[in-house]
Structures are given as structure tokens and as C-alpha cells.
Amino acid sequence: MSESNSVLIGRKPVMNYVLACITLFHGGAKEVNIKARGRAISRAVDVAEIIRRKFLSDVKVRNIDIGTEQVQSSNRNAPTNVSTIEITLVR
Amino acid sequence: MSESNSVLIGRKPVMNYVLACITLFHGGAKEVNIKARGRAISRAVDVAEIIRRKFLSDVKVRNIDIGTEQVQSSNRNAPTNVSTIEITLVR
């Protein structure tokens, strides 16, 4: 249930992810998790802010977690660290 | 007091900001605020993660706030919105 209400932010335009989250809320979700890694973290914050300021004013930020993941790149032996963010929106 | 313990993240290398925060903690600060806007938000998360994972393991994330600021650009009449983040680290 929690996993199915997650939106992973990638390189598409911000509005794609905004619409994905709004669709989940309109489908009855009480909670949506916005997840991102690395450079996409800024876009995740944009998505959360646009949703609650322009579209669903009853949506609140319940929690924000940051963390680090190890990524094994194909051309190097040592894994590299990448920062992560998870923004939990509730309605 | 609170304002003097803020580090604003810009376009310099991540380690510059990591060192700025560590210097504040070593100078006796109990709390350091990492602030960023727009694209620099990802870097702010990197700074917080590097500090607590590699340098000061007793530092915790106490709070993370996201928001929106209006920026008046010089070549357009309408102000544009930019996302912000403020990460509060405590020791």
C-alpha cells in the first residue's frame, strides 16, 4: 500500500510528476511519497511545493527524510554515494 | 545567534560548505542551518549527509523545511517561484 503510493522523481518535466501525485490523491490515497536521488532532489521539492501551493491546498508535508545510497557504477570498482530524499505528503 | 549559524549553499564545491559547517560546530555551535534554493537543494542534502556520515557522527538532522520564494528576474515582469530547503543539524 505504501509502496504503491510512491512517485520516483526522474528527468522528466516537473509537471509529469505533479500530475502523477495528484492522480494518486484523486484515486483516494491519503499519503503519497515523493522519492528522489542525486540531482533529482531539487525537482522533488519543486513537485511537493507545486502540489500544495497550486493544486491541492489541503495537502501537507508530513515528513522529510534524507539519506545516502551506495551506487555501484559499471566503470569503477568503488561504489559511489548518492544522496536521497523522501517527502511524505498527506491529505 | 541563529542567523550567524547559517550556511547558504551556492555553486562552490560541496566540501567548501561541509568545511564551513564543521568550523561552526567546532566553534561551539549546537545548531547549524543549511539553506539552499533551486538547483542547490541537492547539494544541501549532500552537505548534510557528508557531515553526519564522514565527519561528525554525533550530528543529527533535527528538522527539514521546504518552501517557495518569489524571485523577481530582471528581464521579465512576472516573478518566478523557486523552491527552498532548510536543513537544521544539531550536535
Image: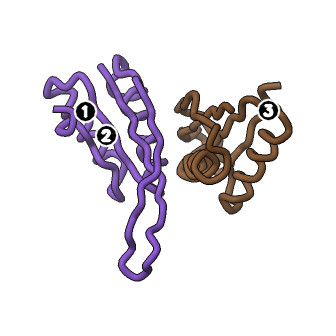
Chain colours: A purple, B brown
Element assignment for label 3: loop
User: How many residues crowd around disc 1 within 10 Å: few (fewer than 14), some, or many (20 or more)?
Assistant: some
Element assignment for label 1: helix
Image check: A24 left or right of B43? left
Task: Tell me the amino acid under the disc marked 3.
Answer: Ala
> In the rendering, at what x and y percent does residue B68 appear?
54, 33
Callouts 3 and 1 in the same chain: no
Measured along the vertical axis of the image, is residue A28 above or below residue B27?
above
Residue furthest out toward the right: B27
Q: Which chain is indicated by disc 1? A: A
CB of mark 1 within 8 Å of CB of mark 2? yes
Measured along the vertical axis of the image, is residue A76 above or below residue B52?
below
Q: At 53% from the left edge and 39% from the top edge, which residue is drawn?
A: B83
Q: Quadrant of residue A57?
A: top left
Task: Tell me the amino acid under the disc marked 1.
Answer: Ile
Q: CA distance from mark 3 to mark 1?
A: 41 Å
Q: At 55% from the left edge and 47% from the top edge, which residue is drawn?
A: B45
- Of badges 3 and 1, the one in the foreground is 3
Give the residue number, with chain letter if any, for mark 2. Answer: A18
Q: Which chain is indicated by disc 2? A: A
Q: At 81% from the left edge and 42% from the top edge, which residue is drawn?
A: B26
Q: Residue B29, labelled with which disc?
A: 3
Residue in the foreground of this view, choosing between B20 and B26: B26
Image check: A1 left or right of A89? left
Q: Which chain is indicated by disc 3? A: B
Q: How many discs mark residues in the rendered view?
A: 3
Task: Tell me the amino acid under the disc marked 2.
Answer: Val
Q: Residue B8, labelled with which disc?
A: none
Q: At 25% from the left edge and 33% from the top edge, which residue is drawn?
A: A22
> In the rendering, at what x and y percent does residue A46 appear?
45, 41
Give the residue number, with chain letter if any, for mark 1. Answer: A22
